[in-house]
Amino acid sequence: MSAPSRIPAMPSRRLFLGAATATTMALATDLTLGVRSAHAADSAYVMGYFTESPNGLGTDYGLHLAVSTDSLNWTPLNQNNPVVTPTAGAGGLRDPFIMRKRDGTFVVLATDLKGTDWGYNSQYIHVWDSPDLRTFTNYRRPRLHDMVTHSWAPEAFWDASRNQYAILYSSVNSSGHNVLMVNHTSDFTTVSAPQVFFNPGYDVIDGDMAVGVNGVNYLYFKSSRTGGLVGARSTSLNPGSFTPFSTSVAHGGTEAPTLVKSLTSNTWYLWGDTYTPNGVFYAWRADDLASGTWTPVDQRLYTHPVNAKHCTIAPITGPEYSNLLARWGAPAWNRLKSYNYPARYVRHADYTARIDTYPFDPYTDSQWKLVPGLADASGVSFQSVSHPDRHLRHYDFALRLDVNDGTGAFAQEATFHRVAGLADASWSSFRSHNQPTRHIRHSGYALRIDPISTATDRADATFSVGH
């Protein structure tokens, strides 16, 4: 067989210095094949994403990061700002992907596209190397093909039979519709000639792989036939060997499947990103990946970063988790999610407090700094991020956003005591400081302080404090 043709990468445009730690390098000897190449030492997760909001106020086409200890509830890093942004091509990215390489370091891939100009047909992808996701080096743009079409949602996996990495992406070939293509590489710089990896005969995009799970390889993708996420499987990694087998899952129009294996149980999670409505993640779970059936995860159990789109999730070690928080920092603000309406978050609108369905703009109307209580430092006051001179206070029992006038009355009305959630002790409820028989609750989606007596009242008065 003749050697595959080689397509050179664009030269590096951006460089940050960094080196793999001894701990990270040692992990390279403990790699096991599987989704995102988990290590025995892994105990947390990192998410990569870009951001879009309904009116564009929270839109940014750089690489954003968040961390989690359970893969369900996420802490955005760097105040939900990008940690690195492409400097060539379209000058922005979509669909980032993070993978730990065989040497224990990371590689980051992304679509070369800024915004939604779907006619921008880049044959290149963005690539960075990183020892620790705190620095990013050797930025380059490998060219994957010479067709007049795109290279969307690149991902990668280790193909042991070829002793190379495989780059999987969506593109339109001679079939006239999107298929999943593959190139092989040893360094994410020089790549082999492209091949069709998966073509079921209709439009498919956003391939995500779980490799070597009990001897089977799984491919999830967005299907144009179902509008949702469908799985295929094969006992090899050969192009053309995958056969669809699973039921389709969707919540509205759903794309960008991300498979995540729990680090503490046999549970698998499948994340999907909706485009109707814009920018909402939903999660499903399965205890057996081979079953091809998925159960929706209760929205109370997970919270994704605000405005996040098309995520990638990779396992990391405990020290890597701590080092990412130390390098980039946790947000200085929180969001509050309703217990019995978990698609809704506390926000202010026209200076009144309410719970509204995510996503919305201005998204900063749902961000709060929980500061020491103005009347009692053991309590809490809610300072608005978008209007920092204003705090939530009750007035005639209704909650509204007012300017702190410095009076004792305002301080009393703007102070609350955080207690165990009245409907779920793992959540939170907030008791009024100067009306101690009343708690914050929603009624008709508006926030107020009321006495709490029924199960419905308790659910209305319970919130999660997250990001």
Image (cartoon, rainbow, N blue to C red):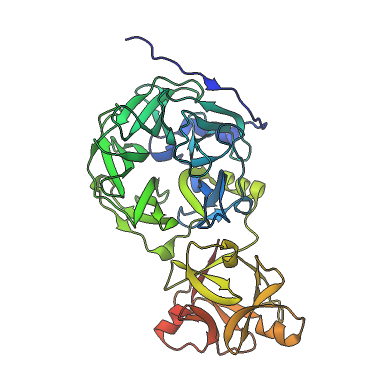
Q: In terms of depth relative to the viewer, which is nearer, 45 or 138?
A: 138
Residue in the picture at 32% in, 42% down: 220
Residue in the picture at 49% in, 48% down: 43
345 vs 330, left or right, is left
Does residue 200 lie above or below 116 as drawn?
Answer: above
Quadrant (top left, top right, bottom left, bottom right) of the C terminus: bottom right
Q: Give x and y (percent) for residue 183.
A: 40, 25
Quadrant (top left, top right, bottom left, bottom right) of the N terminus: top left
- The image quadrant that residue 323 belongs to is top right
Q: Give x and y (percent) for residue 364.
A: 60, 63
137 vs 422, left or right, is right
Does residue 71 lie above or below 194 as drawn?
Answer: below
Across the whole image, how many numbered discs are drawn on residues? 0
Q: In terms of depth relative to the viewer, which is nearer, 460 or 325?
A: 460
241 vs 42, left or right, is left
Does residue 252 lie above or below 208 as drawn?
Answer: below
Single out the residue that lies furthest toward the top.
2
- The image quadrant that residue 134 belongs to is top right
- The image quadrant that residue 211 belongs to is top left
Residue in the picture at 57% in, 73% down: 349
